Image (cartoon, coloured by chain):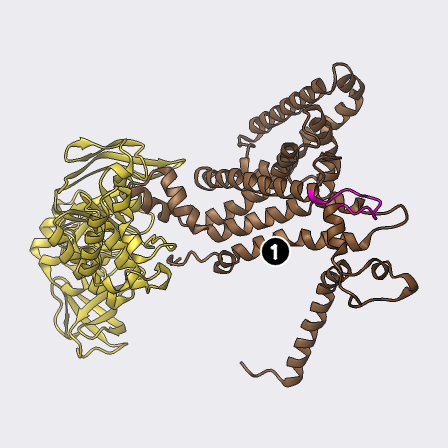
Amino acid sequence: MTHIRLENVTKQFDKVTAVKNLSLEIPSGHFAALLGPSGCGKSTTMNMISGLEAPTAGSIYFDGDRINNMPPGKRGVGFVFQNYAIFTHMNVFDNLAFGLRVRKLPRSQIEADVRRIAQMLGIESMLHMKATQLSVNDLQKVALGRTIVVRPRIFLLDEPFSNLDAAFRAYMRTELKVIQREIGQTMVYVTHDQIEAMSMADHIAVMSAGELQQYGSPDDVYLRPANLFVARFIGSPSMNFIRGRYVSDGGQPCLQSADGASIQLDNHLRQRLERAPSPNVVLGIRPEHIDLAPAEAAPAPLKLPVKIYATEPLGAKTVLHSQFGSQIVQVLVKPGTAARVGQTHAISLQPHRVYLFDAATEKALA
Amino acid sequence: MNTQSRSFRVLRYLIIILWSVFALFPVYWMVNTSLKPLPEWTSAGGRVYWVPSQVTIENYTGIILGGASMANSNSALPAIRSSLIVGVLSTVLAVVVGTLAAYGLSRYQASNQRALPLWAGLIRGFAAPLLTIPFLILFRNVLFEWQGPWLGVVVIFVFTFTLDRLIARLIRRRLDRNPDNLGFSILQLRMFPPIAILVPVVIMWSALRLSDTWYGLTLIYTVVTFPFVVWLMKSFFDEIPREVSEAAVVDGSSQWGVFLKVVLPLTKGGLASTALFVFILNWSDFLIALLITNRDWVTIPVFLQSVSSAASQLYGPQSALGVIALLPPVIFGLVIQRYLVRGLTFGAIKR
């Protein structure tokens, strides 16, 4: 059980700043995900926690001890790599026993530990197989087992499931969560897949271009995105955005979209826009928070005329791609909803689910 | 599979058979000749013997014991001993040192070295040695005759080295780039044809009293084959994903542990083929051995051309020695064959 704290950590590679002034705290026993697109600095952050990279500035603490200069082998971390990094010249048993042998444990204990872990992961029948004979799925199990067996204080997993097929990935997600609860260790998980992060983590750190965008529970990042980036990155299908300008002088105050269409506002949203520092805003609404209304209905606040552009049935839900002016708005509807391509409809946005962002700073507005 | 027509298959095998006959004929003829009695390999009477009419081992006994019937009455045993000792030692030395160097280059010389433009590369590569040659010619009398060859060697070394550093500094100033690409410099050792560097080497070796010694020959072979080892092994090390060694580091392995227990076993196949390649190079070398040795440490290829009588080449004993010389590389090859076949399967990594 180890508490991890990063304090103003920066990593500079030549002229590229991979991680900028990152501060992060992961309470002991928690499961944290570092989430972001490739190149956002999440893997570099992970490498700094493991000790494979040294931070250019800032400090990293395990349980209050500054470990910046501690070599990776002494930190007691376990690392699971995306491409497994299995030692192909050894059989499964030797792979699992590698860390224990480095630690010079007695032979009988190594034997017992390896068997216990192999049983836990369901690979005890493969112990004497060469690593080259294993399937991709089993390789990842061996990689996981090799890390668990040495009982690290911290587990670091760098996109461990991204090479697995979809079904096995879903299975391993659950499995990993169960394992984490069983061993109760702090886990840090790097991924670009928001579903993995949302489904497994206690805390999600959303990163972009080396900077921390938001750090919070899955609910926080989903329900209260701190900025445009987080709002766009979390959720599938992703949030719709309408760029516009709040117009209050003369007549009914409304939100004028970039291509001239205007959106009527309800009282609550009008008040929020009045408080906004700038009239230029981005309105955000998730596809699941939009209702389809009959086209003929009278105009009402937050009601938009749209034309259906494409439909995408997903089974449990259907995604409607609709056109509002020149902008595409995705709407999530029940399957079997009567909406055909080319038809005109109206959509109404659920008033309390509307997000507002400052167009310039991209920060969320209250 | 069986879509090829019959005639095509026949043609294919015919070509293979013809080529094999062509390629294997010299080996056959060597073995054949080595087993013939004297009148048959001298082909007296113009008759060609496709097989010896009477198999004899007199060529082998002659070459090993130093037959009195031959003009060169020396036994080939010292030459065989010399070839074995020097071949094995220099191979081991070049492979060990070269492998360590290659690992260092592969892992620690990061890839952010920007290449020099062509003109700078050429100047960097060749200017210093080429400028040394006129210097050497101009002052050869003074250099090698004033205080013995020792001084000359030292002066030339210092001269070339200083020139090289000056040029490197000039390039660094002008281009703001590091001209000292260690990997490339090592390869440069092989850019000159061996004969071009052999004359100075012969002078140096005699000055350093390394001529005609087992260690002198071992040293020059090691120097000559070392660049091959570095470049071959570096390419094998480059193939191993970083993560594999990082996994071992995180598990607590030392740097040496990572190298010996993880990286080296993964490159076994490459290591074996590199060693074989280097051994064959050393084993078959004629030119260097001819210039560096003259009596005590003559190697098989050099000894071979001296196996002659006043009138002609002694083909029978020569063939016998050829067959003997064939054995070590073949045996070495067979021993490491299973690693070669296994080849470079780093598997387990999905790219």
Q: How many marks?
A: 1
Chain letter tied to brown: B
Find residue B326 and report its horizontal and vertical position in percent.
Answer: 66, 54
Instruction: Tell me where the magenta segment starts and ends, as one range.
Output: B66-77
Q: Does residue B319 appear left or right of residue A227 in this picture?
A: right
Q: Does residue A152 appear left or right of residue B50 in this picture?
A: left
B160 or A320: which is nearer to us?
A: B160
- Subunit that carries the residue with mark 1: B
Q: Residue furthest right?
A: B45
Q: Please determine whether, in this image, residue A91 is positioned above or below residue A338.
A: above
B75 or B175: which is nearer to us?
A: B75
| Magenta-drawn stretch contains B73 | yes
Question: Residue at left 74%, top 14%?
Answer: B147
Q: Is residue B67 visible?
A: yes
Kindly identify the amino acid type of the residue bearing the numbered disc 1.
Answer: Val
Q: Is residue A282 visible?
A: no
Q: Does residue A314 appear left or right of residue B69 in this picture?
A: left
Name the quadrant of the N terminus of chain A: top left
A35 or A314: which is nearer to us?
A: A35
Find residue B63 and report its horizontal and vertical position in percent.
Answer: 75, 49
Question: Residue at left 40%, top 57%?
Answer: B351
| Badge 1 element | helix
Residue underneath mark 1: B330
| Magenta-drawn stretch contains B313 | no
Q: Does residue B220 appear left or right of residue A344 in this picture?
A: right
- Colour for chain A in the figure: yellow
Q: Main secondary structure of the magenta part?
A: loop
Find residue A235 and report its horizontal and vertical position in percent.
Answer: 20, 59
Find residue B160 and report its horizontal and vertical position in percent.
Answer: 66, 25
Dot 1: few (<14), some (14–19), or many (≥20) neighbours within 10 Å? Answer: few
